[in-house]
Image (cartoon, coloured by chain):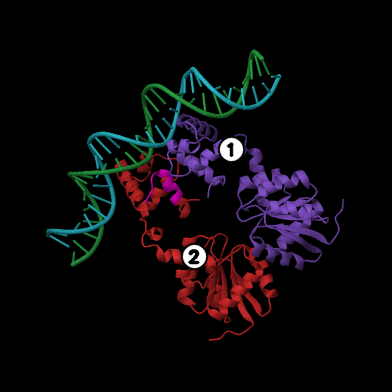
Chain colours: A purple, B red, C cyan, D green
Amino acid sequence: MTTKPPYHIAIVDDHALFAKSLEKLINSFEDFDVIFHAINGFDLQNKLKERELLPDVILLDINMPVMNGLETMEWLSNHHSKIKVLALTMEDEESLMIKMIRSGARGYLLKDIYPDALKAAILEVIEKGFYYTEEVNIALMNALHKKETPDADLKLKKKEITFIKLASTEMTYKEIAEEMNLSPKTIDGYRQELFNKLHLKNRVGLVLYAMKNNLID
Amino acid sequence: MTTKPPYHIAIVDDHALFAKSLEKLINSFEDFDVIFHAINGFDLQNKLKERELLPDVILLDINMPVMNGLETMEWLSNHHSKIKVLALTMEDEESLMIKMIRSGARGYLLKDIYPDALKAAILEVIEKGFYYTEEVNIALMNALHKKETPDADLKLKKKEITFIKLASTEMTYKEIAEEMNLSPKTIDGYRQELFNKLHLKNRVGLVLYAMKNNLID
DNA sequence: ACAAAAAAGAGGATTTTCCCTGTTTTTTTA
DNA sequence: TAAAAAAACAGGGAAAATCCTCTTTTTTGT
């Protein structure tokens, strides 16, 4: 399966100014053609359905409000595994990087790279199938070498997430119990369970966990 | 003082990919010319010093690591008050918006706007001297109408900030007291004082305050 | 140097959080 | 449909956090 120029690119990013600028930049590269722009994962799903021409490469922003990069990546892996995806993000968070790659992203780029690097990355993804920078390699090594604390991707239940969000406010547990229509003792059970499996010492730890995992803010 | 085309624009943003893309976009507008790109406030200072041609408008990103948008804006007001500055940011935080405008920004743009809106904004800044969107006007109104709660920019003492940072960890107050070489009772005083003046109900509130004000993370 | 202000510290009581070991109820699954 | 698993709930106690009023020490302004 050899892809031939012009290469078709799609951009998924909720910041129109960035997306449109990027489109112009990429179109200025020889042999590259931006075929559409989606503002989030849902929009991407619709646009992929209604078009017969699929992109060769998708540049996927990770931080989006409606359907974020990770969810979108998982959907893409299941429905369009042939399309190569380059994740695009503002900050390099190691854990997120790992998750994106595990979900099928072919590369991971920070938005502070220079245009030439982007062009090289897209080309490499098309030709070699992946593009890994030094940072990504280091993160991958770290992930492999850590025997303990896979800690990162254990799944929380809906009620646990609801609880964490409420615990990350000024409400008391009693108030949270009322809000969730559960006994304070049940709430206490949630708390204890979460403390145990997330290795937390107190409620502040829970708030910090919520922050790091984008459950709040 | 009438500015004539071509209009000279400078971009200050640490994300090279965005900055370079934006440059291409703006250069594609008629009568607009990007004369340089700086990656933060310091870089901007240097570039303004070493050039004889000054920009008419600066597009200034607010979230930068080295010298952020607000600090840069204040320097610009003092040293280059004739250059019009449009603040550019990912998210609309009302308090930050107010601060930027108070420091001399002529307008405030979110990165999710469309290119046409950017072009219109730059033109309006050049012609009318300012560009205020609906959001900014609302924020300004809110700021004016709020008699109480200037709440936002009250000054915290060094030790209070140290305390808040430590309170935003899993340490107990006793441990924090040891860390700061103070009696637990003194720490309790700090806590109470902060609760009172920030209108907080508990320690979680303090952590949330620290988050919102970038004292942590 | 001295009064005023700010910072540090204390006593003591109440509430909330935290922790452990259980039972009862509901849901899942073989 | 019976057994197993998960979810909800409870008692009771220790630790931490919260709240109030108050005294002592240090710093500051003039």
SS under mark 1: helix
Give A125 or C11, whichever is nearer the viewer: C11
Residue that mark 1 sits on: A158
Q: Is D15 placed above or below B167 here?
A: above
Q: Is residue A182 left or right of residue B181?
A: right
Q: Is residue A196 left or right of residue A42?
A: left
The boundaries of the magenta stretch are: B199-209
Q: Residue at 72% across / 67% down in the picture?
A: A24
Chain containing mark 2:
B
Tell me the residue at 49%/70% (across/down). Answer: B73
The residue wearing badge 2 is B138
Q: Main secondary structure of the magenta part?
A: helix
Asked whether residue A142 is in view, the answer is yes
Specify whether residue B99 is in view. Answer: no
In the figure, D19 relative to A196: above or below?
Answer: below
Which chain letter matches label 1?
A
Residue B193 is situated, as x and y percent measured from the top left of the image, at 32, 49
